[in-house]
Image (spheres, rainbow, N blue to C red):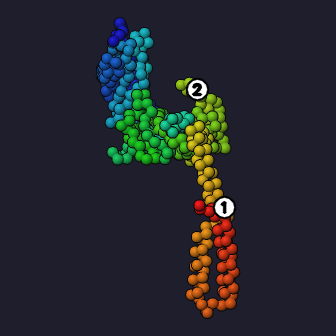
């Protein structure tokens, strides 16, 4: 630990919004939290005065972070990180709390998709960044333990969906649930903006990828690593390119208003050298097999089997004998013509057959 020589100070007000005005929240406990390597947890507690004000003095640690929390109407509200250096006291912190409602309107205000190129596993990684906005004055809560406070559709092809960064996320992994093609949230959503960053994978064999958009979304952005991948929409275009961890992505932007889904097209996957070789070997084998069959048929047509022809003549004679005097003149004529043809073929076959010694 590296404790500071002088004491640090922080303070501010706890307020709530009602009918467009800010009102002080009186007589509520405020907790100062320390988050450090050596120790973490509540450090001190105080209570707001009649004007909702509070103040703390504490011995800060340069290796730790500090924040404040207030519990109001059953919901825990946290401040952002506060300054702990004695020369820079953070004494104007405003912690906004709100009454609760299970019907407060919340919408996915903005969505950003970052899609990588296909990797060795045969999939693409997708980072799906949603900005949720509660424009009202009440905190949105779940109506009961079975129904979520908010939910949104996910692409049906999404695999292994998870919270992208549990450390910096504004929601805990326990508050999220993934149900086939959707994500639902069982956490309160206070007035203002909240960020939810998900990560999942999609098959690299997809040529079209459709991302459903929630109603009320204002804007969306798509970052594609694959140069020939594109967003299929009349008003969408490439606005710039960005490098993320040394990898180049093209950034597409356009209007998401009244758009049910985003369609993203991927190029056909390149055929590897191994697959190309296998295809060539297979094609050559099929060609040789076809030539062999044609050769056998040609030889059979030129040199019919004498035994086959002799058997055909015997069968023809037996059939004619069975008909006897009942055979018509036309049938008798066809019999004689066919027998003469088969006999001529038999003579040719016998003449061309190899002689045994």
x 40%, y 34%: residue: 171
* Cα distance in 3D space between marks 1 and 2: 65 Å
The local secondary structure at tag 1 comes to: helix
Tell me if label 1 and label 2 are in contact, CB under 8 Å: no
Please give the residue where the numbered disc 2 appears in the rendered image.
Answer: 243
Quarter of the image that includes the C terminus = bottom right
The local secondary structure at tag 2 comes to: strand
Quarter of the image that includes the N terminus = top left
Q: Position of residue 335 (x, y in %)?
A: 65, 83
Q: Reply above or below: 79 against 60.
A: below
Q: Is residue 162 left or right of residue 270?
A: left
The label on residue 298 is 1
The label on residue 216 is none
Q: Nearer the viewer, residue 75 or 62?
A: 62
| Dot 2 crowding, Cα within 10 Å, few <14, some 14–19, many 20+ | few
x 66%, y 64%: residue: 352
**1 or 2: tag closer to the N-terminus:** 2
Q: Position of residue 354 (x, y in %)?
A: 63, 62
Q: Position of residue 194 (x, y in %)?
A: 46, 34
Q: How many marks?
A: 2
x 66%, y 37%: residue: 237
Q: Reply above or below: 94 against 284.
A: above
Q: Is residue 228 left or right of residue 129?
A: right
Mark 1 or mark 2: which is in front?
Answer: 1
Corner quadrant of residue 205: top right
Q: Nearer the viewer, residue 174 or 200?
A: 200
Q: Position of residue 322 (x, y in %)?
A: 56, 87
x 49%, y 47%: residue: 156
Residue 40 seen anywhere in this rendered image of the structure: yes
Q: Nearer the viewer, residue 267 or 222?
A: 267
Q: Nearer the viewer, residue 328 or 101?
A: 328
């Amino acid at each position: 630990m590296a404790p500071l020589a002088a004491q640090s100070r922080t303070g501010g007000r706890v307020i709530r919004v009602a009918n467009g005005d800010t009102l002080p929240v009186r007589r509520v406990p405020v907790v100062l939290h320390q988050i450090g390597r050596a120790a973490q947890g509540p450090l001190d507690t105080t209570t707001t005065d009649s004007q909702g004000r509070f103040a703390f003095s504490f011995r800060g640690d340069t290796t730790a972070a500090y924040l404040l929390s207030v519990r109001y109407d059953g919901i825990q509200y946290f401040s952002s990180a506060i300054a702990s250096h004695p020369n820079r006291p953070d004494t104007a912190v405003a912690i906004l709390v709100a009454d609760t409602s299970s019907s407060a309107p919340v919408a996915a205000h903005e969505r950003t998709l970052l899609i990588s190129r296909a990797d060795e596993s045969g999939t693409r990684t997708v980072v799906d960044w949603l900005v949720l906005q509660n424009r009202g004055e009440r905190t949105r809560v779940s109506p009961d333990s079975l129904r979520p406070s908010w939910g949104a559709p996910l692409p049906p092809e999404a695999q292994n969906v998870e919270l992208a960064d549990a450390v910096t996320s504004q929601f805990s992994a326990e508050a999220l649930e993934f149900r086939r093609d959707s994500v639902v949230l069982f956490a309160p959503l206070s007035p203002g903006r909240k960020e939810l960053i998900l990560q999942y994978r999609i098959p690299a064999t997809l040529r079209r990828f459709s991302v459903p958009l929630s109603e009320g979304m204002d804007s969306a952005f798509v970052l594609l690593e694959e140069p020939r991948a594109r967003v299929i929409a009349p008003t969408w275009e490439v606005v710039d390119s960005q490098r993320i961890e040394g990898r180049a992505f093209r950034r597409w932007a356009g209007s998401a208003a009244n758009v049910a889904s985003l369609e993203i097209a991927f190029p056909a996957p390149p055929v590897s050298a191994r697959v190309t070789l296998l295809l060539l070997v297979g094609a050559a084998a099929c060609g040789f097999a076809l030539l062999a069959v044609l050769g056998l048929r040609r030889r059979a047509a030129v040199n019919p089997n004498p035994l086959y022809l002799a058997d055909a003549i015997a069968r023809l004679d037996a059939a004619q004998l069975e008909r006897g005097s009942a055979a018509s003149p036309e049938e008798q004529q066809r019999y004689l013509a066919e027998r003469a043809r088969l006999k001529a073929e038999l003579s040719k076959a016998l003449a061309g057959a190899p002689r045994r010694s």
